[in-house]
Amino acid sequence: MRLVLRLPGEWVRLPVGEPGARERIRELAARLLGRGDERAPLRIALRERLEAALERSEAAGAAEVHVGVALESDVPLPAVASVYRGVPLPTAASVEPDAVMAALVPLVLRAAHEGAGGTASPGPDDRVLDAGRSRVLRRPVVRDAPHGDGATPALAVDYWVTVPGERRAALLHLDVPLVAPAALLLALCDAIAVASRFEAARAEPEEEPQERVAADA
């Protein structure tokens, strides 16, 4: 089974693990912010943020990485969506989504707190969302802005999505700059995660519509 996303607006797929990804990020920054010298610091900050997001995704083994261009033609959205292959959950009592989620939650919490000396407890905005045939564990965090002119903080959200009929969950990571109130951006991210669906695995076509993102789960 593979997770299919329905992404709003226009998105560009980056070639994971290929040198050409950096050039596509450069082109995207110029498209969003123009090529004038007066906006060079903003272009550099955006490019560095997107490159960092791609590097994090590649290091974590992302199957696909997509960059948002715009929600609508006049609403820029330099977001990043990374889709990861699924992880098995053999300890789940059954393949029912609630049972799979019950096995998943303690594993995710434990991993989140390993090495930090804290207890495995949920964050204030952690939620389990109902997506019909799946359950979705949401874990958001606001990441501070990196040093540099024009840099902004970002909302980073992990969504663990149970695979229907399997003891397995896929991971979707969304990274959005805080260009609007965090609550509004989180609602947008939630809508993307809950709208995701699983399809039977098939061979990848050379080109896919950019509003649909898929990765093996």
Image: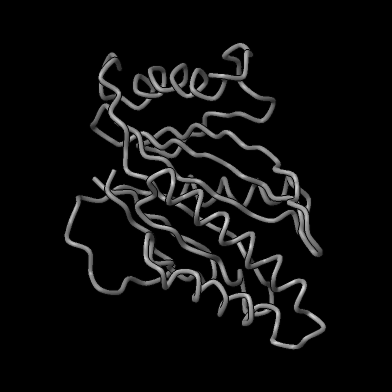
Q: Residue at x 25, y 20 (%)?
A: 90
Q: On the picture, is 8 further left or further right than 35?
A: left
Against 18, is 142 above or below?
Answer: above
Colour approach in the figure: one colour
Q: Toward the viewer: 98 or 70?
A: 70
Q: Toward the viewer: 49 or 175?
A: 49
Q: On the picture, is 8 further left or further right than 90?
A: right
Image position, residue 162 (x, y; %): 36, 34
Q: How many numbered callouts? A: 0
Q: On the picture, is 200 further left or further right than 33?
A: left
Against 187, is 25 above or below?
Answer: below
Q: Toward the viewer: 214 or 67?
A: 67
Of the 4 image quadrants, the one containing the C terminus is top left
Q: On the picture, is 186 further left or further right than 41?
A: left
Q: Residue at x 55, y 34 (%)?
A: 138
- Find the residue positioned furthest to the left: 203
| Picture quadrant of residue 28 | bottom right
- Find the residue positioned furthest to the bottom: 36
Image position, residue 147 (x, y; %): 77, 53
Of the 4 image quadrants, the one containing the N terminus is top left
Q: Residue at x 55, y 50 (%)?
A: 174
Against 53, is 130 above or below?
Answer: above
Image position, residue 178 (x, y; %): 74, 54
Q: Toward the viewer: 103 or 6?
A: 103
Q: Residue at x 34, y 49 (%)?
A: 3
Image position, residue 82 (x, y; %): 46, 52
